[in-house]
């Protein structure tokens, strides 16, 4: 069993890498990269050389290429001590044309060009754009180098950057008491017993803490990074986009590190370091004693994954609860009225587009006075009913169909005929043999039903305005948000591999005849 699991995990890992690689090839090699600017309002507000710089900067942000400006190059030389500030300032001033460069500028332009060309970069210089005698808007001279990222390099950077471990060296500025502190009494709980690990010099202030929200213990030591969104949720990582709570702010009385007490929705346990944030900011100065000022807000609703999983798991439970008994009944009462009625339902669900019967359920629910739109700020439970029914309907049909088929196949098997000939009772044959064997293929799909509840349902979530994860991929595709597309693809691929492995394990648990160990003969 262990050998099988290791092999399956290794194959699954290879499959995930291949799937993500294919998606990256499609995005970065086969699609027009300029499509990322289709919905970018800044793209139309810059012009001339500033527009060129903006385009290359954004293409680097979106993962298409490496982009280095001449200014960045000089700054790196200054930080390393190879260049003093006075020389850097003199060398940074590009002339309107190369022949108008100063001696210092010409020297370092040549060094910049030679260094990056030797590393396979394309060096681009654009002269000053003038409108008569004046420099045109955004027309200042620019010099930069760029190089497209190779697929294997992009894959390596992506997978090695998924897990980020927080460290006391993450903050570059000089700060006092750099290190990690363990306390049994979290300061945010005013002396009450609540263990916490607090960092200084780390990205997160709280590395580990407890609270009243499931799963009650939280950590920021290991952070998952699936890629930063640039249009769906600007500047926010895909994993945070899927897991961050939504809805209205929840105000509560809070005591800030400075001792200020006020009603606020700030979640101080999520505080991260933001260099220079208190400088000139009176609001932060009144509340915080250091630059750990970047916090999330406590909100009333669940995350996108939370909503999708809630609806999905409830729909799956409803489907199994109804479909399995109905499928068994249809098989035992083959060709009866109940069998024909169930078959008609299966045919109806298979033939009618999902959008049609979802709207049918919504219309019927509306006539009965049921809520037809989801409201995150409402505590009502009735608004969950119609989406769950809509989600469960196709699953009920599928499970009924397959349960009926597997039951009939088993009922016509030779071993059942032999059992009857041996004098076994029909109830005993049914419970000990037919049902057990027919349920094995159904059992294999249970982990997939549970795990894929997190992916959401695109049409159902749109119809009922559910803020779930189902619409995330299509929204990312429409907005050409490459990071979100890759991140969600990786998430789906992992769920698929895990679901298959868990399905195999569960099937082997139910049926002892199934073994994953090979025996030499």
Image: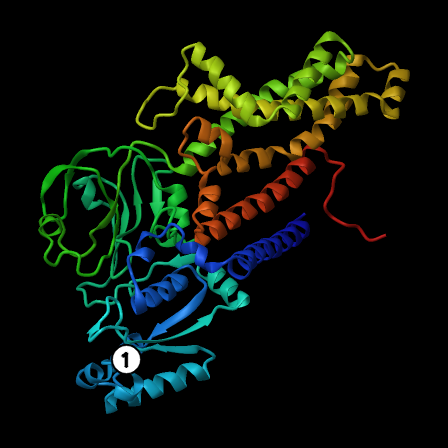
* Secondary-structure class at tag 1: helix
Query: Residue at image x 51%, y 34%?
Result: 453
- Asked if one can make out residue 421 in the rendered structure from this viewpoint, the answer is yes
From the top left corner, tell me how far across and down residue 78 is, in percent: 25, 81
Q: How many marks?
A: 1
Extreme residue in the top direction: 337
Extreme residue in the front direction: 132
Question: What colour-coding does the image apply?
Answer: rainbow
Q: Nearer the viewer, residue 320 or 20?
A: 20
Query: Residue at image x 46%, y 45%?
Result: 478
- Asked if one can make out residue 457 in the rendered structure from this viewpoint, the answer is no
Q: Quadrant of residue 344?
A: top right
Is residue 13 left or right of 4 when viewed as pictured?
Answer: left
Q: Nearer the viewer, residue 452 or 195?
A: 452
Q: Nearer the viewer, residue 65 or 3?
A: 65
Is residue 258 left or right of 196 when viewed as pictured?
Answer: left
Is residue 438 left or right of 186 when viewed as pictured?
Answer: right
Where 35 falls versus 130 (above or below)? above
Residue that label 1 marks: 74
From the top left corner, tell me how far across and down residue 377 is, in percent: 30, 27
Q: Quadrant of residue 42?
A: bottom left
From the top left corner, tell me how far across and down residue 225 is, in percent: 41, 54
Q: Tag 1: Cα neighbours inside 10 Å, few (<14), some, or many (≥20)? A: many
Where 76 falls versus 254 (above or below)? below
Where 192 falls versus 418 (above or below)? below
From the top left corner, tell me how far across and down residue 324 is, in percent: 65, 21
């Amino acid at each position: 069993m262990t050998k099988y699991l290791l092999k399956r995990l290794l194959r699954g890992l290879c499959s995930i890498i291949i799937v993500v690689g294919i998606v990256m090839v499609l995005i970065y090699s086969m699609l027009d990269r300029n499509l990322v600017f289709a919905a970018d309002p800044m793209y139309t507000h810059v012009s001339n050389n500033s527009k060129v710089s903006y385009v290359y900067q954004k293409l680097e942000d979106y993962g298409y290429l490496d982009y280095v400006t001449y200014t960045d190059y000089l700054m790196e030389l200054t930080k390393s001590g190879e260049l003093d500030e006075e020389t850097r300032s003199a060398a940074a001033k590009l002339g309107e044309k190369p022949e108008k460069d100063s001696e210092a500028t010409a020297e370092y332009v040549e060094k910049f060009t030679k260094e990056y060309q030797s590393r396979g970069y394309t060096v681009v210089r654009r002269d000053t754009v003038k409108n008569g005698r004046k420099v045109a808007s955004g027309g200042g001279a620019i010099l930069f180098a760029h190089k497209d990222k190779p697929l294997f390099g992009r894959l390596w950077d992506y997978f090695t950057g998924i897990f980020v471990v927080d460290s006391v060296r993450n903050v570059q500025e000089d700060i006092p008491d750099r290190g990690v502190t363990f306390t049994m009494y979290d300061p945010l709980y005013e002396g009450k017993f609540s263990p916490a690990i607090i960092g200084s010099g780390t990205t997160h202030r709280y590395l580990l803490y407890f609270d009243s929200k499931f799963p009650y213990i939280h950590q920021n030591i290991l952070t998952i990074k699936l890629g930063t969104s640039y249009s769906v949720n600007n500047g926010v990582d895909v994993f945070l986009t899927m897991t961050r709570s939504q809805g209205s702010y929840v105000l509560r009385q809070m005591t800030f590190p400075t001792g200020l007490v006020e009603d606020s929705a700030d979640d101080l346990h999520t505080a991260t370091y933001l260099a220079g944030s208190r400088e000139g900011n009176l609001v932060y100065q009144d509340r915080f004693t250091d630059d750990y000022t970047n916090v999330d807000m406590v909100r009333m609703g669940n995350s996108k994954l939370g909503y999708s999983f809630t609806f999905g798991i409830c729909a799956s439970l409803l489907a199994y609860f109804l479909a399995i008994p109905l499928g068994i009944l249809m098989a035992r009462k083959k060709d009866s009225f109940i069998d024909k009625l169930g078959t008609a339902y299966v045919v109806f669900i298979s033939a009618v587009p999902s959008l049609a019967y979802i709207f049918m359920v919504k219309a019927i629910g509306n006539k009965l006075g049921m809520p037809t739109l989801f409201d995150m700020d409402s505590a009502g439970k009735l608004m969950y009913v119609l989406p769950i029914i809509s989600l469960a309907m196709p699953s009920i049909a599928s499970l009924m169909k397959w349960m009926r088929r597997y039951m009939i196949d088993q009922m016509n098997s030779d071993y059942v005929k032999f059992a009857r000939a041996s004098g076994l009772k029909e109830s005993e044959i049914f419970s000990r043999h037919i049902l057990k064997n027919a349920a094995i293929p159904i059992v294999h799909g249970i982990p997939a039903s549970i795990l894929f509840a997190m992916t959401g349902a695109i049409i159902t979530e749109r119809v009922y305005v559910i803020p779930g994860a189902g619409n995330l991929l299509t929204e990312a595709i429409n907005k050409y948000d490459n990071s979100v597309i890759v991140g969600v693809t990786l998430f789906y691929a992992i769920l698929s591999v895990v679901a298959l492995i868990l399905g195999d394990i569960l099937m082997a648990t139910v049926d002892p005849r199934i073994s994953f160990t090979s025996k030499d003969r």
